[in-house]
Amino acid sequence: TSIAAFTVSHSDVTIRNGIINGTYNPAVDVPTPGVGPLGVKDTGAFANLRLERIVIQNVQSYGISTADASNLQILNCKLINTGYISIFCNNTVSGLVAGLVDGNLVDRSGIPANHITQPCVAIRGSSAANYTTGLIFTGNKLIGQQSPTDPSAACMELRFMRNCTVDS
């Protein structure tokens, strides 16, 4: 099973100024989706989630996992050694409308290259009807591993996005 340090169950939630330190040991633990602890989970399509100045480190599964969470804000957070995917926005049912991901550090350089099977950041829609729109992804630093063995281990994966801004 996968247990989250914070499970969001309502709209209009702000989490700020905290440290989530898991027990994941990158040298020996292999990240598996849905297995092991994760940092923050909002998979109920709750709107207006704001994460600010949070450090999430050494969690085996997802650092931050959201689903169809409109007006999502992830600001000035650090995600270090988050095993499976550091920031995962799965916008496949109703899509994500608006949001800001700014000033974050995602560092997976401490995880062996052969253990990384997914991107640092994945923002996924599923079709022309369910997509991400109006998201601004700016001022973030993503650090991955050199030469991961899995071709899915990119720094970013973007699927089905419209009218969004992605820059450094």
Image (cartoon, rainbow, N blue to C red):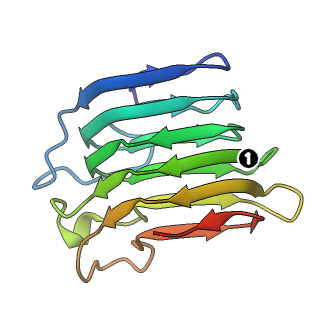
Q: Name the residue under label 1.
A: 96
Total numbered labels placed on residues in the image: 1
Q: Where is residue 111 in the image (x, y as percent from the top left)?
A: 19, 60
Taking the view exactly as shown, the residue that stands out farthest to the left is: 27
Residue 85 occupies quadrant = bottom left
In the rendered image, the quadrant that contains the N terminus is top left
Task: Note whether 153 is above or below 81 in the view shown.
Answer: below
**Can residue 2 be seen here?**
yes
Q: What element carries label 1?
A: strand
Q: Which of 155 and 28 is in front in this view?
A: 155
Residue type for callout 1: Leu
**Can residue 7 be seen here?**
no
Label 1 Cα crowd, 10 Å radius (few <14 / some 14-19 / many 20+): many
In the rendered image, the quadrant that contains the C terminus is bottom left
Taking the view exactly as shown, the residue that stands out farthest to the top is: 10
Q: Where is residue 137 in the image (x, y as percent from the top left)?
A: 55, 58
Residue 15 occupies quadrant = top left
**Residue positioned 24% across, 54% down in the render:** 30
Q: Position of residue 59 (x, y in %)?
A: 28, 40
Q: Where is residue 16 in the image (x, y as percent from the top left)?
A: 39, 24
**Residue positioned 54% across, 30% down in the render:** 50
**Residue positioned 82% across, 44% down in the render:** 94
Task: Note whether 95 is above or below 42 in the view shown.
Answer: below
Q: Nearer the viewer, residue 155 or 74?
A: 74
Left or right relative to 140: residue 74: right
Task: Note whether 141 is above or below 3 in the view shown.
Answer: below
Task: Note whether 72 is above or below 162 in the view shown.
Answer: above
**Residue positioned 44% across, 60% down in the render:** 139
